[in-house]
Image (cartoon, rainbow, N blue to C red):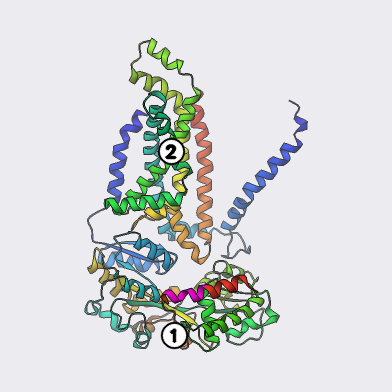
Amino acid sequence: MNRSKGGVPLFAFVVTAVFFYAPLLVLVCFSFNASRTMTWSGFSLRWYGELLFHSADLWHALGRSVIIALSSSVTATALGTLGAIGIYWYNFRFKRYISIASFLPLILPEIIMGVSLLILFAAVGLPLSLFTIFIAHVTFNLPFVVLIVSSRLDEFDYSVVEAAYDLGAREWDALVKVVLPISLPGIVAAFLIAVTLSLEDFVITFFVAGPGSTTLPLQIYSMIRFGVSPVINALSVMLLAASIALAFLGKGVYRYIFQR
Amino acid sequence: MKKTLRCLPLLLVALLCVCGGARRQKLYVYNWTYYMPPDVLDDFRKKFNIDLVYDVYPSNEDMFAKLKSGAKGYDIVVPSGDFVSIMIHEGMLAPIDKKRLPNFACIDTAVLRRVTFDQGNQFSVPYMMGASGIAVNKTQVARYEHSWSIFDRADLKDRMTMLDDMREVLGAALKYLGYSVNSVDTAELAKAKAVVLGWKKNIVKFDAESFAKGFASGEFRVVQGYAENIFKEYDSTRRDEVDFFIPAEGGPMYMDNLVILKNAPDKEAAYAFINYIHSPEVFARIVDYLGYPCINTAARPFLKRKPNYELADLRNCEFKEDLGEKLELYNRAWEEIRMGN
């Protein structure tokens, strides 16, 4: 490949990078601003101090968000993976329609999902709490997991499974020793997407949150009546640092798992 | 994968434990954001050994929608006056037994007499009373009157903002003309609309979110808004640059009130909380934190800071009331103001 002809792609890359990272850069800068206004008045760690020692509500909200994200993603990944394998592996009546129906929630507007879940919980008499948020997040994460794991399964050659049967594997062995390892990258990707979706969800969570179950997006929303506090900037920078660290760490783990 | 599956029930159990919680006495309060200092809440937890769960909302509408859509379990919410009357009407509130609130007697009787939305305070206990006013940057504007007429000044054109809130803006215009902020008279509203259209020529925009930041950065010189929003953007050293006043003609004002919900799980803890909030030293700490006028007579000697404005500044102001169906008149006028020129 002739590398000197990269002018246009390079330009496109720079524009995209600026587009993506300029807001983040502004955010990072202002989190170190000494004053609370948008005018620069000197470097200070004041907002980080405020965040660490005087923002218990934010930390509680973040804690709830993390609990919900991890628990709902693990559950959704487990159920969704089994579902995807089930659709892939077995033949049954209406299979086509069932697989289409399982993707419907993907295109359903979030607000409809929120309202319908709320009505369901009210009808069943389940009081709104962290548990209802957990159920809601599992619900909206499921179709994503099914979609991602299925697309991985569609790619791989079914003859591998037949070969496993020929070599004396039972159904269980074929599942655990062949299908699951092959679809593992899809499962990991689905899990990560589920965590992200769950952490940032506002609309559905807004409907199904009950007393004492404010998640981080809900907490931030209720704080912006008084303008975006610099404490939120500081928190965003810390979350940003955490996600970058995770991304690099994740890359290492990924290599360790798949490229031994 | 097998491991993950095996962990799943454990995770569910852990989650249920989080939801279930310990068996200590619990109180759920649902209040506006930044409306009570955290240390006051912590002191309450310690003093009464009650597990206080404190959630926040950004507007009356959010709170009302949440409760109506089936959020059960809150004991105390803090609606504004118009929403108190709506919630009384909907049968959502438990009557207040003043015998269980010794500190109710500390509240200024002159303030209680003005309460129209719940006469005799049978369902609500006043928390804070305030109004939107006008903030002027004194370093940029030399001479001005304490009147809504400041928005008529062409020399300040494109340097002023008003709230994006029809009751606040039309209410200001109605008061400016000498009418009630709750007027439902079409002729009066038409005149108020004409006044607002005149102001609209001079202001940059109707803005309820970022006006305070723009004001603090010097972009706007005169803004209509709430004192707490504006001073939140200022460090204590620069406060003197700002003159915040309630116009002499008066304007719309509000009162936020502590109420106990009819389906509150723990009314005893709720009474303890309300009584605690109105104990003089505690209330003085809250007023110092918020900068609101102090409606608790017994708390006044404990104040360490001068409030942003005084009760006397509100003498000509009027509570915004729930207008029911008549609100449509305001909607229409406001729509014409936003569209027209």
Mark 2: amino acid: Pro
Q: Is residue A201 visible?
A: no
Q: Is residue A203 visible?
A: yes
Res. B5 image quadrant: top left
- Badge 1 and badge 2 in a common chain: no
In the picture of the structure, the residue carrying the numbered disc 1 is: B311
Give residue A143's mark. Answer: 2
Kindly check if marks 1 and 2 are in contact, taking CB atoms under 8 A apart as contact: no
Chain part drawn in magenta: B325-331
Position in image of residue B306 (x %, y %): 47, 81
Position in image of residue B318 (x %, y %): 45, 84
Image quarter (top left, top right, bottom left or bottom right) of the N terminus of chain B = top left
Label 2 sits on a secondary structure element that is helix
The image shows residue B133, relative to residue A199, as above or below, that is below
Tell us which disc is closer to us: 1 or 2. Answer: 2
Label 1 sits on a secondary structure element that is helix
Q: Residue furthest top?
A: A167
Res. B85 image quadrant: bottom left
Mark 2 belongs to chain: A
- Left or right: residue B89 versus residue B169 is left
Image quarter (top left, top right, bottom left or bottom right) of the C terminus of chain B = bottom right
Position in image of residue A8 (x %, y %): 75, 38
Q: Give neighbour class at mark 1: few <14, some 14-19, many 20+ (Cα, 10 Å).
A: some
**Residue B267 lies in the magenta stretch:** no
